[in-house]
Structures are given as structure tokens and as C-alpha cells.
Amino acid sequence: MIDLVASMREVTVYADRALVARRGNISLEAGEHELRINDLPQFLRESLRAAGEGPQGTRILNVDVTTAFHSRPPESELQSLLQELELLRQNKQLLEARQGALNDRRQWLRALGEQSRDFAKGLAQGQMKPQDCADFFRFTAEQALQDAEAAQSLDIQLKQVQGEIDAKSRELQHKQGSPDPDRLAALITVDLAQAGEFSLELSYLVMGASWHPQYDVRVQKTAEQNDGQVELTYVGVVQQFTGERWENVGLSLSTARPSLAAVLPELEPWYLNVYTPPVLRAPMYAASPQGAPRMARAMIAGQTAELSAAMAEAANGTEEEVAYSVTADVATATVEQTGTALVFRAGRSVDIPSDNSPHKTTIARDNLPCTFDYVSAPALDEHVHLRATIHNTTDRILLNGDASIFLSGEYVGTTRVETTAPTETFKMFLGIDDGIKVKRELIERSVDKGNLLQAGVRRTTYAYRLLVHNYAPAPRNVVIKDHLPVSQHERIKVRVLSIQPAPKERSKLEVLTWEFALASNAEQQIEYRFTVEQPQDVRLTGLK
């Protein structure tokens, strides 16, 4: 058996796992050889794949996995941390031993001081001199002071060492990924028809790795603009605690979901039935459930896509120095379409430790066209919100993720980008604009109890007025949303009398939407009236 060092070259991260690719080279004689790649993390054994290149007639005969048992993690970085932690613990034990010896001496000194009451008898009998008593008390006082200072110093050192032990333990816990010190080893059997150089490529899937998108949305907008561009920075946030450090690897982020690829949802019959009231029974202190819930089954899809060739090295060109500075370009990823998924390949090698800390890599930075309008729903809030309708003109899918918004260089807040396909539009609110004021008020509420032919019927008329004023120095595209009441009872009737002006949209649930361009220092008035009829003995809820 020959130990082969296969260094990590590429990692493809999915939403809940990662595909790790390693590569190693070795010179072999003709014949059959068993190669062993040690210290691999706990990966999905069925995902192990091997490929290789060698002289004519080279064959891979077998691929197997075995467990290497360790008393402690074999990685050099973890071993170094464990050694540092062990030294700190030994130092703590030494300080505790010194503290114990000091306490013993202080107890002995205290016991010696208790015997000083016999000094008077010794002086009276001429067995001791006054100078001997003075020297004794001076010695005990000085020794007690030294011991008190030493005890205080030891307490301080013990607290410092304990703090260092706690910090080292947390660092070890973060970098360890898994408390299990055992590792896997791959066993590859190859047969060479002739001696030569053999290059082995190994890949496997590990859990404990993930990535999710984040966005930075930067908008530079002047008061006169009603359309423009939004700078959207697409960032992938990678986290992993797989038990191995990803060092100087080519990183790819995939939108594929292997755990769902082989599962097709099955529809079940949709039954309707007559409602049967439950039978009331006396409470029981112990009951066992009748039957167990049906468990959903999922299949883990195998890895079908092959790894791409090694990433191209970046050209290290030089340019003449210039006397002025320019804005630095941001390194972005290249995009590849693989079946139904996208793969974002980072433009440089990265280091990601196994501590589950987030690491960002920029996928793309694009200027996307957008239009601006101003939206308000005064029944809920009379503030007016600036909204951007953004057109995804890229060939990338924008995945669901958080977004930080910057308007004219100022941080506005956070929002969420929903999954958006290429050529699709999405909307994003950019904050409150105080240049437009909206006021909603009840201008009429009259009650008609009906005549003799309508005995027992109560009719109430309501009228609302909305005033929209544009105080901005430029025209604004304004969207106002409001609603009318909808009856949920057959004895309650709602009749709309008038809506001026007519809304652009009116849903079946009476949600009204007006859209209009409002000139600078102009005002738009909206009024609507409706009646509500109800029996005198019926009390309404929901009117406001």
C-alpha cells in the first residue's frame, strides 16, 4: 500500500453540502498498486468518485473507503491548537500547586502565631529575651505580607490562564467542525501496463457546508429622475464546518439542489366531506395516539455532473503608473449553465476555515435599468415610499436573499430580493420620501333608519377623501392604494355609490389602486362613497 498526498483543488458548494475535488501525482512501476489517501473528513461514502490519467493501458480496478482511528484530530493546525491548550492546562496545574503550597505555609504561619501567647511565660522564666520576641513578630509580619502578595499574584495568573484556556477551547471547537477525531481514508487500486506518472482525481460530497446569496443595492437618484439605473452587487456567503480547512482552492457556488433533484411531488386526492362536530369526551390523563403520521421519503440524488477542468490562471500583466487614482474593479465570478442549474466560479483561490464563519465572494456587479414611483396606502400609513421597479437584464437568476439598500450613498435599511428569473422584473422599496404628502379623512357619516316599508333596516353612508400633494421640485409618478369594505354576511349589504376618479385597478376584494403623474406643487383629490345596510339587531365589526 502506498500513501498518496492528494491536495484539495476545487470545491463546489450547494445549498446544504459541498463537492470536494482533490488531485495527486505519483510515479509507479508497472503492475497493480493500492493507493491510500489519508485524513479525509466524514463524507458521504457513496459519493466517492475516482478518475485518473497514466500511461497507455492504465486502469482503476477498485475504489473503497476505510476508517482511520485517531485519539485526536490529525490535522496539523488542530494538533498545534491541542498542544497549546495542553501547555496552558499544565501551566494552570502548576499555578494551582503553587497556590496549594502557599496556603499550607500560611496555615503553618497562622498556627505558629497562635503559640505566641506562651512567649510571656518564657520571658518571665528567663527562657526568652525581648529581642527574640521582637524578631519573631517582625518575621511573621513580613512573611504574612509576602504570602498575601503572592496569593493575590497567583489568583491573577490563574484567572488569566483560565481565560486563555477558554479562548483556545472555543477556537478549537470552531475549527474542529466535528468532535469525532476519526478520519476516512480512500483506497484506490490501479493497474499500470507500464511504468510512468499517474495522476489521480478524487471527489466526494461532504455535509456541513452551505451558501446563500446577499445583495447590496446602490441607487444614485436626483430629484428630477423618474427612471435610471440600480447598481446591484450579488454576493455569495459561504459557511462550512466539514472538519477540513479549504486552503487555496478554486471555489464554485451552484444553484443545484442535489437532495431534491430525484424527488417528484405526488399529488394526493382532494376530498370534500360534510363537517361532523367532534364528540366531547371526558379528559384522560394518559392517551396514546392512534396511528402514526405518514413520513415523507426523500432520495439523495447522486452527483452526475463532472467537475470542470482546472481554473485558468489570471494573467499578471503590468501597466504604467499614472498620476491619478481610479475606482478599483471588483473581482466577480464567471457563470456556467449546467442543465437546470447555474454555477458561479470565483475569479480567485480562497481560504475558508472549518469554523462555520461566513465568508463572502462577489458573484457579480451589474447596473440594472429601473423606474421609480411613489407608493402610499394611507388607510394604514400616510407616509409615501419610494419604490424602484428593477429589470433583471442579466442571464443570471437572482436567488432569494437579504439586501442592504444605499440611496445616494446613505444606508437606508434592509429588504429581501425574491427569486427573479432573467428578463423578469422585481420591486424594491427604498425608503420614505417626505416630498409628497398624503392625507385621508372621513368627510361624511350619515345614518338612515329607513321608512315603514323598510322597517328594521339601518343604512349608513360613508364618504372618504384622499388629498395627495407633491411638494417636490419635479413631477412624480404616484401610486395610491385604498380599499372598500367587503361583506362576509348575507344580511349585510355594501353598495358603492361613487369613486372619483375611477381607479386603474379594482380587485374582487375591493382593493383600489390609482396611478397618476403629479406635477410639482400640484394636488390630486380622490373621493369615494358607499353605503352599508344592516338589520337593526345586527352589530357590525370592521368598520372604521
Image (cartoon, grey):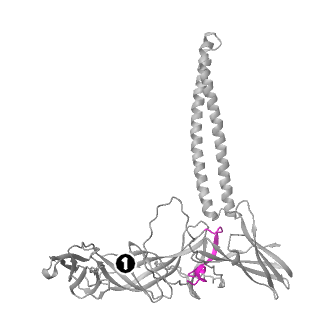
Q: Nearer the viewer, residue 381 or 269?
A: 269
Task: Tell me which amino acid carries mark 1.
Answer: Phe
Horizontal arrangement in the rendering, residue 463 relative to residue 206 (left or right): left
Secondary structure of the residue carrying numbered label 1: strand
Which residue is denoted by mark 1 in the rendering? 429
The quadrant where residue 134 appears = top right
Q: Nearer the viewer, residue 224 or 380?
A: 380
Residue at (66% x, 41% y) in the render: 97
Across the whole image, how many numbered discs are drawn on residues? Answer: 1
The quadrant where residue 227 appears = bottom left
Image position, residue 2 (x, y; %): 81, 73
* 504 versus 544 height, above or below: below
Image position, residue 397 (x, y; %): 50, 84
* 67 versus 103 height, above or below: below
Give the residue at the far top of this rendering.
125
Q: Nearer the viewer, residue 239 or 248?
A: 239
Q: Nearer the viewer, residue 204 or 250?
A: 204
* 420 versus 7 height, above or below: below
Query: Would residue 179 be visible to someone looking at this image?
Result: yes
* 482 versus 67 height, above or below: below
Query: Would residue 466 be visible to someone looking at this image?
Result: no
- What segment is highlighted magenta in the picture? 241-265
Horizontal arrangement in the rendering, residue 515 relative to residue 234 (left or right): left
- Locate the N terminus and report the quarter of the image it occupies: bottom right
Image position, residue 57 (x, y; %): 82, 88
Residue at (75% x, 66% y) in the render: 68
Within 10 Å of disc 1 (Cα), the crowding (few <14, some 14-19, many 20+) is many
- Locate the C terminus and report the quarter of the image it occupies: bottom left
Image position, residue 20 (x, y; %): 66, 76
Residue 343 is inside the magenta segment: no
The quadrant where residue 137 appears = top right
